[in-house]
Amino acid sequence: MELGLAGKTVIVTGAGSNIGRGIALGFCKEKCSVIVADIDAKQGQAAADFFNKETGANAIFVQTDVTKRDSVQAMVKQAIEKTGRVDILINNVGWTRDLFFLEKPENEWDREIALNLWSVIHCIKAVLPHMVEKKAGAIVNIASDAGRVGEPREAVYSGAKGGVIALSKALAKEYGRYQVRINTVCPAVAVPQKPEEIGEQSMWKENIGFMTPERQAAWAKLYPLGRFTTPLDVANACIFLASDAGSYITGQTLSVNGGFSML
Ligand SMILES: NC(=O)c1ccc[n+]([C@@H]2O[C@H](COP(=O)([O-])OP(=O)(O)OC[C@H]3O[C@@H](n4cnc5c(N)ncnc54)[C@H](O)[C@@H]3O)[C@@H](O)[C@H]2O)c1
């Protein structure tokens, strides 16, 4: 299969930890220049160094706060200055903390909407003019099945991720005529397996202890394929959708979830 990815520039937000780290590594293996756009300088730089050592790729860390318009605009400017182009954007940053709606502090709702929805709006706004001008581009937004079916204890997160899915479809309709494609990937539970996959700002930092091997094994039985999602599973879906092999696919939502929910 011809992917046509070599030499392209890919921005991956939140590429320092867990799923984003796996996605960025996947694109590095496809010989892309990868912008590691993460708020955590230590984690993001370590990830970029790791990608370059593993793959010989051109991964560049650019410290970015995706909840801030100016920071996102500056990151995209740097990406273009350093690599001359931006072809692909993977909006991966997201965050939640499981609590019932009425028990949740309201500032956590703000954080969920900022990290899951505003981040995607800011990043798309920053790259879209370049893609429209070139009449080419691919954007993959990482949402969640919570945004498709609704998840108890994740009500506002579900709303934000549902917003990402609807936003992707609307923009796919608006910008398809410029050959800019926008799709959404919904992972299921993906638990980091190594300490280096968890940065200080990862939502797993506080929760990894809860995911004991016994609990993971019990929950995995709920999945038809008998296991959780891995970052590689998500990376493969993003690579396909962003590549020439996915060139007739836009506005779609793909759950990469071992069959946990079938939509
Ligand atoms: N892991 C799962 O079980 C799971 C399941 C379904 C969907 N998802 C979605 O997948 C995506 C990745 O999840 P994860 O588990 O890898 O996340 P994570 O919390 O482990 O990693 C998030 C990364 O984003 C960075 N980050 C945090 N705030 C930032 C900011 N303001 N600006 C820039 N970078 C920032 C962190 O430093 C970290 O490197 C999210 O959108 C999440 O909602 C995850």
Image (spheres, rainbow, N blue to C red):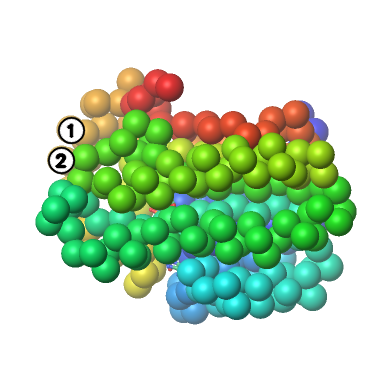
Does residue 121 appear in the picture of this structure?
yes
Q: Is residue 193 visible?
A: no
Q: Ligand 1 appears in which quadrant?
A: bottom left
Numbered-mark total: 2
* Quarter where residue 248 is shown: top right
What x and y, as percent, mark residue 107? 27, 68
- Please, what is the three-letter code of the amino acid marked with disc 1? Ala
**Image point 42% across, 63% down: which residue?**
114
Disc 1: which residue: 218
What is the secondary structure assignment of the residue under circle 1? helix
**Residue that mark 2 sits on:** 214
Residue that appears at 70% across and 52% down: 88
User: Does the residue at mark 1 contact the one at mark 2 (Cβ under 8 Å)?
Assistant: yes
Residue 236 location, quadrant: top right
Give how far across and how far down residue 262 sits, in percent: 40, 21
With 154 as the anchor, is 127 left or right in this view? right
Q: Position of residue 9 (x, y in %)?
A: 74, 59
| 170 shown above or below 105 | above
* In front of the other: 99 or 241: 99
The residue lying at 71 percent from left, 46 percent from top is 138
Q: Residue at x 53, y 33 (%)?
A: 253
Between residue 21 and residue 243, name the one nearer to us: 243
Disc 1/disc 2 C-alpha distance (Å):
6 Å
- Residue placed farthest to the left in the image? 103
Q: Amino acid at mark 2?
A: Glu
Give the side of residue 120 with respect to residue 132, left or right: left
Vertical relation: 155 (above or below) 89 = above
In which image quadrant can residue 222 be found? top left
Would residue 223 be found to the left or right of residue 251 on screen? left
Is 166 situated above or below 95? above
Instruction: Give how far across and how far down residue 81 sits, in percent.
Output: 79, 75
Q: Residue furthest right?
A: 134
